Image: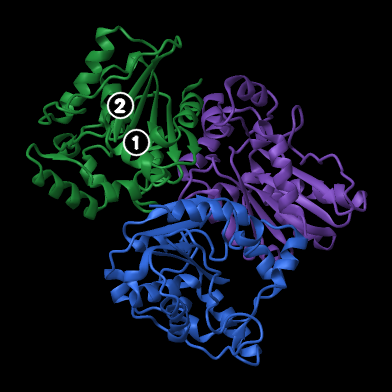
Chain colours: A purple, B green, C blue
Amino acid sequence: MARSLIWNGKATRHSPPTIVGHGKGVPKNVNHAQCTKSIVDYIVERSLEEIVLVGHSFGGTVISKVAEAVSGRIKRLVFLNGFVLRDGFSLRDEIPPHQAELLEELAKESSDASVTLPFPLWREAFINDADLDLAKSAYAQLSPEPSLPTKDKLDLKKFYSLDLPKSYINCTEDTALPQGEWGWHPRMSGRLGLYRLVQMPGSHEVIFTNPAGLADKIIEASRD
Amino acid sequence: MARSLIWNGKATRHSPPTIVGHGKGVPKNVNHAQCTKSIVDYIVERSLEEIVLVGHSFGGTVISKVAEAVSGRIKRLVFLNGFVLRDGFSLRDEIPPHQAELLEELAKESSDASVTLPFPLWREAFINDADLDLAKSAYAQLSPEPSLPTKDKLDLKKFYSLDLPKSYINCTEDTALPQGEWGWHPRMSGRLGLYRLVQMPGSHEVIFTNPAGLADKIIEASRD
Amino acid sequence: MARSLIWNGKATRHSPPTIVGHGKGVPKNVNHAQCTKSIVDYIVERSLEEIVLVGHSFGGTVISKVAEAVSGRIKRLVFLNGFVLRDGFSLRDEIPPHQAELLEELAKESSDASVTLPFPLWREAFINDADLDLAKSAYAQLSPEPSLPTKDKLDLKKFYSLDLPKSYINCTEDTALPQGEWGWHPRMSGRLGLYRLVQMPGSHEVIFTNPAGLADKIIEASRD
């Protein structure tokens, strides 16, 4: 549910870093500041410049904070059905109350306050464009999501003052957030001010259902 | 304007039943309960199981009530730009007032309280993606719509308590309901709770303008 | 940003007229009535009949007023992400306040109260589907837009009483107006009453990014 990809402007490509607390078998007791720091460190240690930083879903909150920390290294931010939080709000504040309650219940049922969406829900609302085999194999690759980073309220004043190019990729069948009043686009995208809109068919998990098509759209969203 | 298709889970296919009061040359003085009963009887008489039930437009109200009657026989409900009524409301309650008034006027002008949309309106708002020849030949296949089933207020408490898989196919150029505040999606679809969204280009009458494309989307909406 | 194309019903084709005050090196001190008159004169001088009149963006306001003047010569109006103003309103009244302020500032900075959008804004919000080379070459073809025609409040009572066929072509990635509350569709389109909706992928400047695809859609929007 959350990925961030990094390409630098010279067309060399780096394998995408993993946000701390994400992935299988790692401790889930991390907060949002630690998530941000893990990506900032990755960038600084490698002296990356002219980065196009792609944030998917929760990843949108991370690239927003990373941009505050290393804005001079970033060429463009690309939100892929990513959260664009209002200043002072958390991810949990930006989703429908019934979804926030479900996340809280799932976290309580886990041993480490992490969240794993039940397959039937994820299959219908997140990967609606897959057949059952792909849905199952993709689900097997998911790992529990830490809770704290979705509950931390973020100071985004600097983010909203940055003059960075931004793009928003909206997958038109993404129902991870219900379309309409609570939807990704134009609710989240519209907060970016001036931004480039790119759209494609697909669900929230288009990286599994149409990776080549998504790559084309990331290029379209990333170019000058 | 209203069709319901039935497939059973074993991939054999039944010719779609006709809702009572629909079709040419049949009595139009039927109510919604009779519409529902005609489909329930069709299912029970044939001992159908594991059904995927597709309801288009008005047909959405019928599959909702059929699901209440024979939920154990149904594998999934598929709404194709179909009405998902609020509990206690009628179809007429869910369309813009000027449309409801037009339907009432047309019913009064007929000898049997049935409704036939004038061609110019239907051609522009219902089959906007057809050329004129196709629009005319499709229009010739339509039959008058009985009024009562669109005026009956439906008790849908059981429908909203059922734990059945549901899909919504939205044709993105469907303007039979005006898009936006009164539109099919996400207004109608969002009432389904957890559901699978499938979209395709096309008008309200995509069954005439792109039947093969629609068949693909029905399969996508129907699979596990 | 504003074009109007004319075809007559006999499938001969006229080169599109240029609205007065538009184009490079012409005086920009024209008002909306003069814009309308320049198109009406073009039509009357050539004795054109059975016209399909296409208005893009600002051009939507012009075809609305031209229709009032020569409704008998017009077969259909086609709005291509065009403004459909409310009676008594100006174009500036129909765009978000921050956009109206920007237009006013840009006009003040010019020597002739004309508006030229800065390239970075235009590139991101108007031609988001182009690569940089195409964006640059298209931008070089633009000319300053006169201000008065966007500030004149238009009497559109007759327009709203006309019984003319109308179509609306909506490019689904057009963010010249922000999508949602202030968007082209269904906000502008919905004001047309009965109309034919045609959609296609693309930005506000699809005439540069996909002219052949646009031509197909204009034909689809224009046919009987």
Say which residue label 2 marks: B63
For badge 1, the amino acid type reads Gly
For badge 2, the amino acid type reads Ile
Q: In the figure, residue A3 lies in which quadrant?
A: top right
Give the residue displayed 51% in from the left and 89% down from the top: C30
Q: Judging from the image, what secondary structure is the residue with disc 1 in?
A: loop
Q: In the figure, residue C205 lies in which quadrant?
A: bottom right
Compared with residue C156, is residue A41 higher up or lower down, i.e. above or below?
A: above
Give the residue displayed 29% in from the left and 36% down from the top: B1
Which of the chains bears the disc numbered 1? B
Q: Residues within 10 Å of mark 1 (few under 14, many from 20)?
A: many
Does residue A215 appear left or right of residue C217 in this picture?
right
Compared with residue B38, is residue B181 higher up or lower down, i.e. above or below?
A: below
Q: In the figure, residue A85 lies in which quadrant?
A: bottom right
Whole-angstrom CA distance, mark 1 to mark 2, is 10 Å
Q: Are marks 1 and 2 on the same chain?
A: yes
Cβ atoms at labels 1 and 2 below 8 Å apart: yes
Q: Position of residue B61 (x, y in %)?
A: 27, 32
Say which residue label 1 marks: B82
Is C72 or C146 nearer to us in this picture?
A: C72
Is C7 or B103 nearer to us in this picture?
A: C7
Does residue A210 appear left or right of residue A92 in this picture?
right
